[in-house]
Image (tube, rainbow, N blue to C red):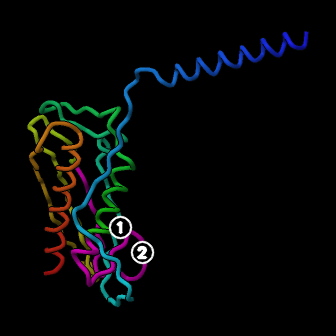
Amino acid sequence: MNRVFHRKLFMVMLMALFTTLIGCSSNEPSKNYFQLTSNLTNKPSHTMKKTNHFIWIETIDVASFLNTPGIVLQTENIKYTTATQNLWVSTLSQQLADRLMQDMTLFLPNYLVSNKSITTPTYTVKLFIDGFHGSYTGDAIIKGRWVVTDSKNSIQTKTFDRHVPLTDNGYDALVKALSKGWQDEEQDFAKSIKH
């Protein structure tokens, strides 16, 4: 009796495992995760760096339609779609903040750049992102506005509207174009800070 019970229990467990394995190998498409890239190389410094200039990235405000895990495509003049299988590896605002801190540190080596309020900032930066998506025109669209306050509370603004042509079809090409456009915008912004 005990042997029969154990055999039945073993068969039930085996069937449950088999069913689980079949369920895991269903034809549901896999998800792809994307991250913004940079072609800049950051060589670590082995010495302490001294500076009196601090840029505080206070906020990065991403438009609500872009504030989703999925990459956004503009499919018509008035229509946008959010991908369900092609996703950002982390929030867009977090990726933009990471890229901004790393790249601006290279563009402006005499400045400390951080999203934490470490000391009295030379410049406080607020960034508003209104477009960061693909378009039916075949371009990556990057639109927004920088708002910079200096240590004397003087405010300057700079708008940007970049259309970067995709070199190929697909999300890989879109993310590469968005990455290139964003790095170009960072570089232009860094030049405006130097003056």
Q: Which mark is residue 23?
A: none
Q: Give neighbour class at mark 2: few <14, some 14-19, many 20+ (Cα, 10 Å).
A: some
Seen in the picture, residue 107 relative to 19 is either above or below; the reply is below
Pick the front one: 189 or 99: 99
135 part of magenta stretch: no
Decide which of tag 1 and tag 2 comes sooner along the chain: 1
Seen as rendered, the residue at the extreme right is 1
- The number of discs equals 2
The quarter of the image holding the N terminus is top right
Could you say which quadrant of the image residue 26 lies in?
A: top left
Residue 68 is at least partly visible in this image: no
Q: Residue at x 35, y 77 (%)?
A: 44
Residue that badge 2 annotates = 117
Q: Which mark is residue 58?
A: 1
Which amino acid, by three-letter code, is at mark 1? Glu
Magenta part of the protein: which range? Answer: 104-130
Which image quadrant: the C terminus? Answer: bottom left
Q: Nearer the viewer, residue 140 or 148?
A: 140
Above or below residue 114? Residue 184 is above
Q: Is residue 125 magenta?
A: yes
- Residue 160 locus on image (x, y percent): 13, 58
**Can residue 113 be seen by looking at this rendering?**
yes
Would residue 21 be found to the left or right of residue 26 on screen? right
Residue 44 lies, with reference to residue 33, above or below; the image says below
Who's the residue at 17% across and 52% down the image?
143
Residue type highlighted by circle 2? Ser
The secondary element bearing badge 1 is classed as: strand
Q: Are marks 1 and 2 in contact (CB under 8 Å)?
A: yes
Give the left or right position of residue 36, taking residue 47 as reference: left
Q: Which of the 4 quarters of the picture holds residue 87? A: top left
